[in-house]
Amino acid sequence: MTLKLRTGVFCADTEYGIALLDEDSGEYWELNPTGAQVVRTLLADGTSEEAVRQLTGACDVDAESAREDVQGLIEALDSSGLVER
């Protein structure tokens, strides 16, 4: 599964990860480096499984926990209206 930012949502690198700005509402969300890595992977046409592999390679986390975290982030971004699938 890949993601696309909804029209009006912009992504900016920060010192701590990335920020997603919803131009329509003026709200923004900050993602830590781990969340940023997942979002970057998915926005670059990567799959959720690729994001899981990157997390397990870079962090001390098992594949099942990483998979749950990736899915949770995707659901949060989707329910916030920031992305299109």
Image (cartoon, rainbow, N blue to C red):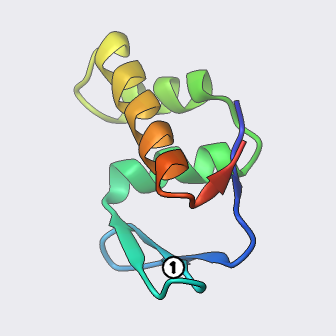
Q: Quadrant of residue 62?
A: top left
Q: Quadrant of the N terminus?
A: top right
Relative placement, left or right, of 19 versus 32 is: right
Residue in the foreground of this view, choosing between 24 and 67: 24
Asked if 41 appears above or below 51 in the picture, the reply is: below
Looking at the picture, does residue 20 appear above or below residue 6?
below
Residue shown at the point (34%, 69%) measured from the top left: 30
**Residue 40 horizontal/vertical position (percent):** 59, 53
Choose between 36 and 28: the one closer to the eye.
28
Quadrant where the C terminus is found in the figure:
top right
Q: Give the residue type that dot 1 points to.
A: Leu
x%, y% of residue 75? 47, 38
Viewed as shown, does residue 14 lie left or right of 83? left
Residue 65: image location, x then y, percent: 29, 18
Please tell me which residue is depicted at 69% across the width and 78% down the height of the picture. 8
- Helix, strand or loop under label 1: strand
Residue at (50% x, 44% y) in the render: 38
Residue 11 quadrant: bottom right
- Residue 73 horizontal side relative to residue 45, left or right: left
Q: Camera-side residue: 58 or 45?
A: 45
Q: Residues within 10 Å of mark 1 (few under 14, many from 20)?
A: some
Identified at 50% across, 83% down, the residue is 25
Q: Taking 65 as reference, is 2 above or below it?
A: below
Where is residue 2 drawn, in percent x and y?
Answer: 72, 38
**Camera-nearest residue between 57 and 1:** 1
Looking at the image, which residue sits at the far left? 60
**83 with respect to 21 (left or right):** right
- Disc 1: which residue: 21
Total numbered labels: 1
